[in-house]
Amino acid sequence: MISKLGFYGGQGSVTGANFVLDTGDLKLMVDCGLVQGDRFAEAVNREPFDYNPSEVDILLVTHAHADHIGRIPKLVKEGFRGIIYSTEPTKALAEVMFADAYKIMLFEEEKYGNERLYEKENIQEALGLWKTVTYNEDIYFSDLVSGCFTDGGHIMGSAMVHIKRQGKKIVFTGDVGNVPQPLLNPPTIPKDYDYLVMESVYGDRSHEEVNERTSLLHQYIEDARRRNGTLIIPAFSLERTQAMLLEINNLVESGTMKPLPVFLDSPLAIKVTDIYQNYIPYMKESVQKQIKTGDDIFAFSGLSFTRTVADSREIHKTRGAKIIIAGSGMSHGGRIQEHEKRYLEDEKTILLLVGYQAVGSLGRRIEDGAKRVRIGDSDVKVRAKVARIRGYSGHADREQLIDLVAKGGDEAKQVFVTMGEEKSSLHLVQRLRDYLGINAIAPSLGEEIEIDF
């Protein structure tokens, strides 16, 4: 039987994941994410979908990052009335991510005149269509089509999507977790599939600092202490912030590091951290055991949560060495920009990047060595030390991605490499062909490919 697989986002780009599998009698979508760059509501996100949303029957959500869920309310606004499936943590996290996104859209509408992608009621409509399942639970979409979710190891509740039809199987990896993760189990290797749609964020490079990441973090903290300066960590509110809190908690609680003021300056990250507390069984066993011994991994000496703008503005009054963790992770919005405006011109400051910086983002320009950047209405000189720890990436690197296919792709008819910058995707395609003899391709944006499914 022939089905059509449409690639409508995440081709030649890390962000904007959006795939549609049309079996002829059923249309299943995997993810519906934002294209992200310098602003939250990039113009491309306001363009019409390449398909009729009202014809989509099922939406399967891999995880709650904005580049995978950010256009779901827009999909609903434009006619989608099917069923949305995800794990329970993904739905809980999506709810707070949508609320935060709406606030940002209102701000950008007022400041830049950007049209909103959707209305508040579209968020509630989307959540009303949402059903949750557990890992490995069978889901029956029709008499012929079924599926399940398995652990993606990327963020809390992240999943790979398996879709089965009359003995054939296609797997969508979503974002594949880096190994090891501070909080989470490694991804479950998918096996016995005919087709694989996989990510390639780091398809052309390796994470060389995974084993050293904790000691490197400690070094940068102590460097900030010696400088009597500020360590600024732009961190994604979802997962990266919680990983940073766990790492600093362990350094303090073990006596390895003397406490110093640490400010979590992100209302969204604080809400996400509260949700993490509700889903401890989704954390890896060693962390669960740590919590059972009485260690509150998200609370330690020196840590303060700054929930209000007034609290955020008070941070600079804390003299001496301090750590500020704030969003967004790529510095394209949020409170991190106010801290960067204040501290980047200070040579005592260390800006520590612990996540991927997309092309076009402020974080990427700083990472690439810009000596002067525009932040809002301010022209800011970059005199701070800019540091990078690649080992905290939430994404699998080249070797891990190749290993994922090597361990489960023996029967694969074809592997579709997506969700990466063009050079990363093409590099991984070539590696899969050369090293594993896999029929791998990198589809183009908007391409529709017929598969035997």
Image: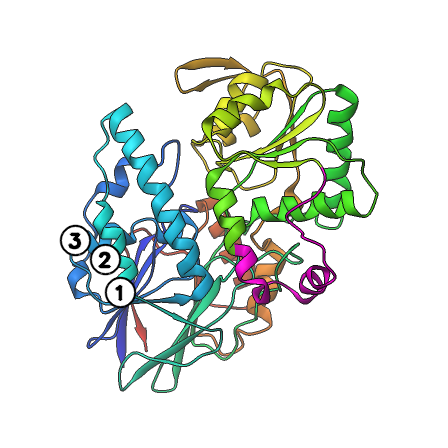
Q: Which mark is residue 129?
A: 1
In this orientation, which residue lies closer to the viewer: 236 or 403?
A: 236
Q: How is the image coloured?
A: rainbow
Q: Earlier in the sequence, mark 3 or mark 2?
A: 3
CA gap between label 3 and label 2 equals 12 Å
421 left or right, relative to 44? right
Residue 416 image position (x, y, % from top left): 42, 62
Which one is in front in this view, the residue at disc 3 or the one at disc 2?
A: 2
Q: Callout 1: helix, strand or loop? A: loop
Label 1 crowd (10 A; few <14 / some 14-19 / many >=20): some
CA gap between label 1 and label 3 equals 14 Å
In this orientation, which residue lies closer to the viewer: 435 or 236?
A: 236
Is the Cβ of the residue at disc 2 closer than 8 Å to that at disc 1?
yes
User: Can residue 41 be seen in this snapshot?
Assistant: no
Quadrant where the C terminus sits is bottom left
User: Residue under circle 2?
Assistant: 125
Q: Which residues are magenta?
A: 276-301
Q: Which mark is residue 78?
A: 3
Quadrant where the N terminus sits is bottom left
As drawn, the residue found furthest toward the right would be 255
Residue 115 image position (x, y, % from top left): 21, 35
Residue 184 image position (x, y, % from top left): 61, 60
